[in-house]
């Protein structure tokens, strides 16, 4: 078989695909563990990738944050908000899936935005994603440490818990991708089993099977489907709409991190097959893990329940803030709240582990593209990008800010709150890259039949994602303008990412004199060679 043609066996059909000329310097004979050159190990099996796709970054966003969504939007508003954003995120993942299954050797959406749009946008998108995920690591570490206070109320022990959790997360990432994948597989399985159990529990409570014997049915959906008292706004129709709109931002936070699946391309076994399966699994994550669970918890709990409102006002970060635990305690079920707290703890730990992996790989990919110091492309024989991992791990130390004075804690919370907008900016970049990729293939006469994974929602799906998240992001900080006293902190935390990305984009464009890639000059060929590995470009200097 020539280098210009490759056969994809995707377990359903085999397709002969014209992939264009072999990229310069590519060696199709180099396979994993058959070269002494530093390279990434393709040790993540299909089961690892699928589980990471379904529940890898699932953390406090669903277990704790869904309570705020229920209180803000009401039971129907919460479900609709998560459904709308879930569909948008699903469309985004299909856009990303078409590109990364076609070319799993690429540096994820960092390389896609550089190749299909503008190298300056790839630079801005890459550093924005690295910053977003690097800041999420200490956020989840702090959440995990505070969750322990559900049992240990002594705040003096908080630094100890932060230290133990940090050491655990860093150790797993240092152990190698094989052990990382195994760890995430079992903890993702635990999350899925727990959520399925919670869904069954909520169904039993709703039907009157709990100790209180109260058959709730659709009582709360009928009495208060939306929040008519949101922020005491008048008229009620305005409060209902803006309460639902607030759910969109909360949902974006919960869904954040899904795009990190592209980082796994570098180390996935048989990436074309595993990535395609993983993208399809996103649908089950959105429908089962989010929509169904929110639907049922909204049937069991009134949005104005004093226990729910008190929990969200306190913002404890423990299981007491979870709507599932409020259902458990108000319906008279014993012990189960401690079990849920333990699972929330493991989910926060797992999420911090996943985000450290994604951020270190993002920095490695930036170095590979020459958009970060080359030293970050250094790889150990075990396949670990050691310098990128070590540098990113330093930012995890920000978790100790939460152990200091109230001012430091407030500064940390302000910094961590920007991750939601960061996710939406990343999703916009992916959608824009796919729009250009689609147009480039069409301009060069390349049929979409060459794509190993092809979605029927394109090209309009990417346009819907781009336009929708522009609107949601633009209005994400509107609450700061509600009252006479302008909330400067809330406003800037809602929008600070935007000038950051603009500065990165135009700064790189000015220094490197980059141009938007023309459709006819765009490289729309795949650079992936079956069985090949990603080698560090540091050795080529």
Image (tube, grey):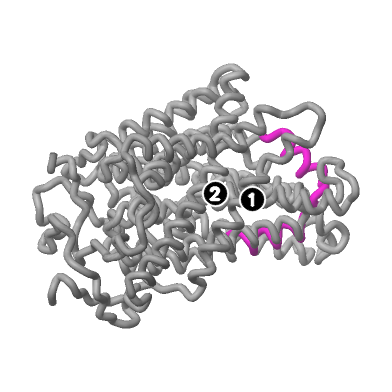
Q: Which of 369 and 83 is in front in this view?
A: 369
* The disc label shown at residue 452, or none: none
Q: Position of residue 178 (x, y in %)?
A: 28, 52
Q: Is the magenta stretch mostly helix, strand or loop?
A: helix
Is 119 placed above or below 482 here?
below
How would you rate the neighbour count of disc 2 (Cα within 10 Å): few for under 14, some for 14-19, many for 20 or more? many
Q: Magenta stretch containing residue 321, yes or no?
A: no
Q: Which of 150 and 380 is in front in this view?
A: 380
Q: In this view, does 256 lie to the left or right of 66?
A: left
Tell me which label, 2 or 1, sits earlier in the chain: 2
Q: Is residue 535 left or right of residue 145?
A: left
Q: Mark 1: which secondary structure?
A: helix
Q: What segment carries the magenta color? A: 289-315
Q: Where is residue 411 in the image (x, y as percent from the top left)?
A: 58, 24
Q: In which quarter of the image is residue 439?
A: bottom left
- Per the image, the residue denoted by label 2 is 424
Name the residue rendered at 76%, 60% in the picture. 76
Q: Is residue 161 left or right of residue 5?
A: right
Q: Residue furthest bottom?
A: 13
Q: Where is residue 381 in the image (x, y as percent from the top left)?
A: 16, 44
Q: Magenta stretch containing residue 309, yes or no?
A: yes
Say whether marks 2 and 1 touch (CB < 8 Å). Answer: yes
Name the residue rendered at 51%, 38% in the picture. 140
- Per the image, the residue denoted by label 1 is 472
């Amino acid at each position: 078989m020539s280098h210009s043609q490759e056969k994809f066996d995707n377990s359903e059909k085999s397709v002969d695909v014209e992939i264009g000329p072999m990229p310069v310097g590519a060696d199709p004979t180099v396979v994993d563990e058959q070269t002494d050159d530093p390279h990434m190990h393709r040790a993540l099996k299909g089961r690892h990738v699928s589980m990471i796709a379904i529940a890898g970054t699932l953390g406090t966003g669903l277990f704790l944050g869904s309570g705020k969504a229920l209180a803000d939007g009401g039971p129907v508003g919460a479900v609709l908000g998560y459904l709308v954003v879930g569909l948008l995120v699903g469309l985004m993942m299909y856009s990303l899936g078409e590109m990364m299954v076609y070319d799993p050797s690429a540096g994820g959406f960092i390389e896609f935005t550089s190749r299909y749009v503008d190298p300056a946008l790839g630079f801005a998108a890459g550093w924005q994603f690295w910053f977003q995920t690097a800041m999420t690591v200490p956020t989840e570490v702090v959440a995990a440490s505070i969750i322990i206070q559900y049992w240990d109320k002594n705040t003096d022990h908080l630094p100890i818990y932060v230290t133990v959790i940090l050491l655990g997360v860093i150790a797993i990432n240092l152990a190698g991708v094989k052990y990382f994948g195994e760890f995430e597989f079992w903890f993702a399985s635990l999350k899925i089993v727990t959520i399925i159990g919670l869904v069954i529990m909520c169904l039993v409570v709703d039907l009157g099977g709990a100790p209180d014997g109260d058959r709730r049915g659709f009582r709360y959906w009928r009495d208060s489907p939306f929040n008519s008292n949101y922020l005491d706004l008048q008229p009620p129709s305005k409060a209902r709409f803006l309460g639902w709109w607030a759910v969109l931002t909360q949902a974006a936070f919960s869904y954040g991190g899904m795009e990190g699946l592209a980082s796994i391309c570098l180390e996935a076994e048989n990436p074309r097959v595993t990535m395609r399966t993983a993208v399809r699994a996103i649908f089950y994550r959105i429908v089962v893990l989010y929509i169904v669970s929110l639907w049922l918890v909204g049937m069991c709990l009134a949005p104005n329940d004093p226990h729910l409102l008190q929990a969200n006002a306190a913002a404890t970060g423990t299981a007491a803030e979870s709507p599932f635990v409020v259902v458990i305690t108000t319906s008279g079920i014993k012990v189960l709240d401690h079990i849920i707290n333990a699972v929330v703890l493991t989910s926060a730990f797992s999420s911090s582990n996943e985000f450290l992996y994604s951020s270190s790989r993002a920095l490695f990919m930036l170095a590979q593209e020459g958009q970060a110091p080359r030293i970050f492309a250094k790889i150990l024989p075990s396949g670990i990008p050691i310098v990128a991992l070590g540098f990113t791990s330093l930012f995890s130390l920000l978790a100790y800010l939460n152990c200091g004075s109230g001012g430091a804690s407030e500064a940390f919370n302000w910094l961590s709150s920007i991750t939601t907008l960061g996710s939406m900016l990343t999703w916009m970049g992916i959608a824009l890259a796919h729009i250009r990729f689609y147009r480039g293939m069409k301009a060069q006469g390349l049929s979409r039949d060459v794509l190993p994974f092809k979605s029927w929602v394109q090209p309009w799906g990417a346009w819907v994602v781009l336009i929708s998240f522009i609107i949601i992001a633009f209005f994400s900080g509107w609450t700061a303008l509600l009252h006479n006293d302008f909330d400067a902190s809330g406003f800037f935390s809602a929008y600070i990412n935007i000038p950051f990305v603009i500065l990165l984009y135009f700064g790189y464009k000015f220094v490197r004199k980059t141009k938007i890639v023309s459709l006819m000059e765009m490289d729309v060929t795949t650079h992936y060679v079956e069985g090949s590995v990603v080698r560090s470009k540091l050795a080529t200097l």
